[in-house]
Image: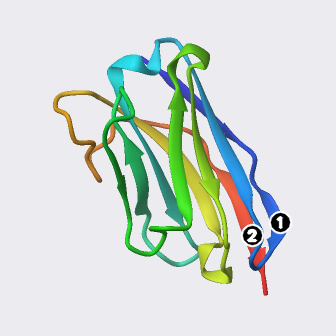
């Protein structure tokens, strides 16, 4: 079983950038799909981005495509989410998730392991 801890959240002005990190323990992340999700107040949790074990395949929600970049460093057991051109509607708690890899393309749902989340607030 893998444990996930997110960091890097905070308060930023619209147009700014943040980089979130998710560090895993318990198992190497090299056997997992890794994903980022977010949940805004009063809304359901939604998919943001995902990456396969070799970084050869990534997926993004339409709302963040071109602004966010997911990456991973298996040697450091860490996955990142670089968020640029942030908007107030990006305000949410961001969660890291892991799912045992079973194919080439990472899924947008069905992740088994979750972190506790990190708050991202974008002011206008």
Q: Mark 2 points at which residue?
A: 121
Element marked by disc 1:
strand
Describe residue 79's horizontal placement relative to residue 16 as left or right: left
Front-lying residue, 56 or 107: 56
Residue 115's label in the rendered image is none
Q: Which residue is drawn at 77% across and 70% down?
A: 16
Q: Residue at x 43, y 54 (%)?
A: 49
Q: Which residue is drawn at 16% across and 32% down?
A: 103
Front-lying residue, 1 or 24: 24
Q: Residue furthest bottom?
A: 124
Describe residue 66's horizontal placement relative to residue 116 as left or right: left
Q: Position of residue 12 (x, y in %)?
A: 82, 69
Describe residue 74's horizontal placement relative to residue 108 as left or right: right
Describe residue 36's horizontal placement relative to residue 31 as left or right: right
Q: Name the residue under label 1.
A: 11
Q: Quadrant where the N terminus lies? A: top left
Image: 18 above or below 28 = below
State yes or no: discs 2 and 1 in contact (Cβ < 8 Å): yes
Q: Quadrant where the C terminus lies? A: bottom right
Q: Residue at x 71, y 58 (%)?
A: 119
Res 85 quadrant in image: bottom right
Q: Where is residue 111 in the image (x, y as percent from the top left)?
A: 33, 41
Element marked by disc 2:
strand
Res 78 quadrant in image: top right
């Amino acid at each position: 079983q893998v444990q996930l801890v997110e960091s890097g959240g905070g308060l930023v002005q619209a147009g700014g950038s943040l980089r979130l990190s998710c560090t895993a323990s318990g198992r190497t992340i090299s056997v997992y799909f890794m994903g980022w999700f977010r949940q805004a107040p009063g809304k359901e949790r939604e998919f943001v981005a995902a990456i396969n074990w070799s970084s050869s395949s990534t997926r993004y929600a339409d709302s963040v495509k071109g602004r966010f970049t997911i990456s991973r460093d298996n040697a450091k057991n860490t996955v990142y989410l670089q968020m640029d051109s942030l908007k107030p509607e990006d305000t949410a708690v961001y969660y890291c998730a892991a799912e045992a890899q079973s194919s080439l393309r990472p899924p947008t749902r069905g992740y088994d392991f979750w972190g506790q989340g990190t708050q991202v607030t974008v002011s206008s």
